[in-house]
Amino acid sequence: MAKNMQPVLKRCKALGLSPAALGYSKETKRNPKQARRKQSEYGMQLTEKQKVKFMYGVLEKQFHKYYERAEKKQGITGEILLQELERRLDNVVFRMGYANTRREARQLVNHGHFTVNGKRVDIPSYQVKPGDVVAVCEKSRSSTKFKTLIEENGKKAMPKWIEKAAESFEGKIVAMPARDDIDVDIQEHLIVELYSK
């Protein structure tokens, strides 16, 4: 399985992405002396694609499959693409507050700490759908790791499409994620323009 092992803060600085959006607390500082050249249209499109890939921890081949799947569905391709990425199990685990970062969520899912509708799932790219119940496995609930995570993130604001009681070990997907649930500044139309060339 391929993994993105790039340094997070360095990559965030290069893409102009806030580390807080990925769950990291350290903020990068821009050097005012280091002026960037004006980006070409292609450069802006590529940067936007790299930003989304890096944010969700997806590599090129898998990202292209998500795009092709979004293109086949009816609706706005860019919004459907983001919806597909938001429905990944590792992202849902991060959104529910069971992990501090998406990378940590991916690792916890890989190690089999979560169930979907009572069945253990260890595939981070598993697509959840409305009505699914995502929960921490019974064995994992007693670990200090999850107890501290739930205490720390218990009051974290949930997206509208996820229903979870504060400090509980399970949450329910009540709807499909909407575009306004994504709090990071993403211009998905640039990604669509890049792929439609």
Image (tube, rainbow, N blue to C red):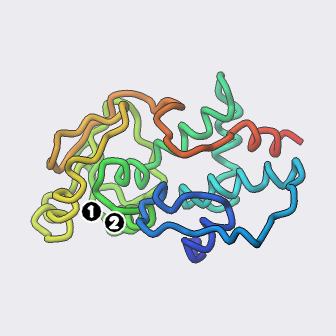
Question: Of all residues shown, which one is farthest toward the left?
Answer: 142
Q: Disc 1 versus disc 2: distance between alpha carbons?
A: 6 Å
Residue at coordinates 35% horizontally, 62% vertically from top-left?
Answer: 100
Mark number displayed over residue 113: 1
Q: Dividing the picture into quarters, in which one does residue 23 lie?
A: bottom left
Where's residue 134, x and y in %? 28, 45
Point out the tag, 1 or 2, that comes first from the N-terminus.
2
Residue at coordinates 54% horizontally, 58% vertically from top-left?
Answer: 18
Residue at coordinates 55% horizontally, 69% vertically from top-left?
Answer: 28
Q: Residues within 10 Å of mark 2 (few under 14, many from 20)?
A: some
Residue at coordinates 58% horizontally, 71% vertically from top-left?
Answer: 4
Image quadrant where one finds the N terminus = bottom right
Where's residue 169, x and y in %? 17, 50
Residue type of the residue flagged with mark 2: Leu
Mark number displayed over residue 108: 2
As displayed, is residue 62 above or below residue 9? above
Mark number displayed over residue 9: none
Relative horizontal placement of residue 167, taking residue 174 as reference (left or right): left
